[in-house]
Image: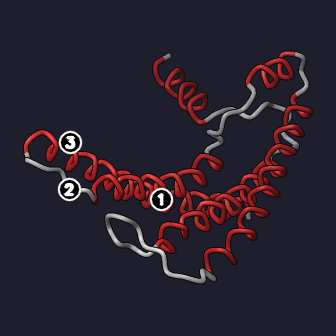
């Protein structure tokens, strides 16, 4: 069961990464068009700045879920290192679990508070330069906190599955470095 869950998490992460990459490339194209047009054309198109902003927002919406699953969020390393130096690996895991649970509660609260406001807008608002309905832009908030909730739940399950391990969790890059050292040495 753990292998199928890990496979699902991997596929979910790859899908989020793919969408994040699409929006990142779109962001780069918008900025590149803006730079080229400001330097080579008499006037720059006004839509590129707005499009870059919106693609950046969507890129972040997809990237936050990936950051949770890869354990890339900022954490107080001093506390982690101090606890591990004293052999308190379990306490470190409990603290990380509590922080993740708090993030889940906050993300779920924001998600459920944002859905009615976005879904039931009373008047039609459009963006200034692109004339896109703002519901599409505000929908990124639902995506962000929806993917964040799903990713946090998956992360909590991963943490609970590895809770009985006595060794501290190692980051992906640490595992890769150990593998490289074994191959070289």
Say which of marks 2 and 1 sits in front: 2
18 up-or-down from 134: above or below: above
46 up-or-down from 164: above or below: below
- Which residue is labeled 3 in the image? 35
Q: Is residue 153 left or right of residue 29?
A: right
Q: The residue tagged with tag 2: helix, strand or loop?
A: loop
- Which residue is labeled 1 in the image? 58
Picture disc at residue 45? 2
Q: Nearer the viewer, residue 60 or 73?
A: 60
State which quadrant residue 10 falls in: bottom right
Q: The residue tagged with tag 3: helix, strand or loop?
A: helix
| Colour treatment of the image | secondary structure
Q: Is residue 101 left or right of residue 74?
A: right
120 up-or-down from 159: above or below: below
Whole-angstrom CA distance, mark 2 to mark 3, is 10 Å
Mark 3 burial class by Cα count in 10 Å: few <14, some 14-19, many 20+: some
Q: Is disc 2 in contact with disc 3, using a CB cutoff of under 8 Å?
A: no
Residue 27 placement (x, y as % from top left): 34, 52
Q: Residue at x 59, y 46 (%)?
A: 67
Q: The residue tagged with tag 1: helix, strand or loop?
A: helix
Q: Residue at x 31, y 56 (%)?
A: 26
Q: Nearer the viewer, residue 20 or 108?
A: 108
Q: Is residue 163 left or right of residue 113?
A: right
Q: Residue at x 74, y 69 (%)?
A: 113
Q: Residue at x 81, y 51 (%)?
A: 161
Whole-angstrom CA distance, mark 2 to mark 1, is 21 Å
Q: Nearer the viewer, residue 141 or 166?
A: 141
Say which of marks 2 and 3 sits in front: 2
């Amino acid at each position: 069961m753990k292998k199928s869950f890990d496979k699902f998490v991997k596929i979910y992460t790859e899908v989020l990464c793919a969408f994040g990459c699409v929006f990142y490339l779109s962001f780069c194209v918008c900025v590149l068009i803006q730079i080229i047009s400001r330097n080579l054309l008499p006037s720059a198109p006004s839509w590129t700045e707005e499009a870059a902003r919106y693609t950046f927002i969507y890129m972040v919406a997809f990237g936050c879920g990936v950051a949770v699953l890869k354990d890339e969020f900022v954490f107080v390393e001093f506390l982690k290192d101090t606890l591990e130096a004293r052999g308190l690996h379990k306490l470190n895991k409990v603290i990380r679990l509590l922080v993740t649970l708090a993030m889940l509660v906050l993300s779920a609260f924001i998600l459920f508070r944002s859905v009615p406001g976005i879904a039931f807008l009373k008047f039609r608002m459009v963006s200034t330069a692109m004339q896109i309905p703002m519901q599409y832009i505000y929908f990124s908030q639902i995506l962000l906190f929806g993917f964040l909730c799903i990713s946090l739940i998956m992360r909590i399950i991963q943490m609970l599955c590895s809770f009985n391990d006595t060794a501290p969790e190692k980051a992906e890059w640490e595992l890769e470095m150990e593998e490289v050292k074994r191959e070289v040495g």
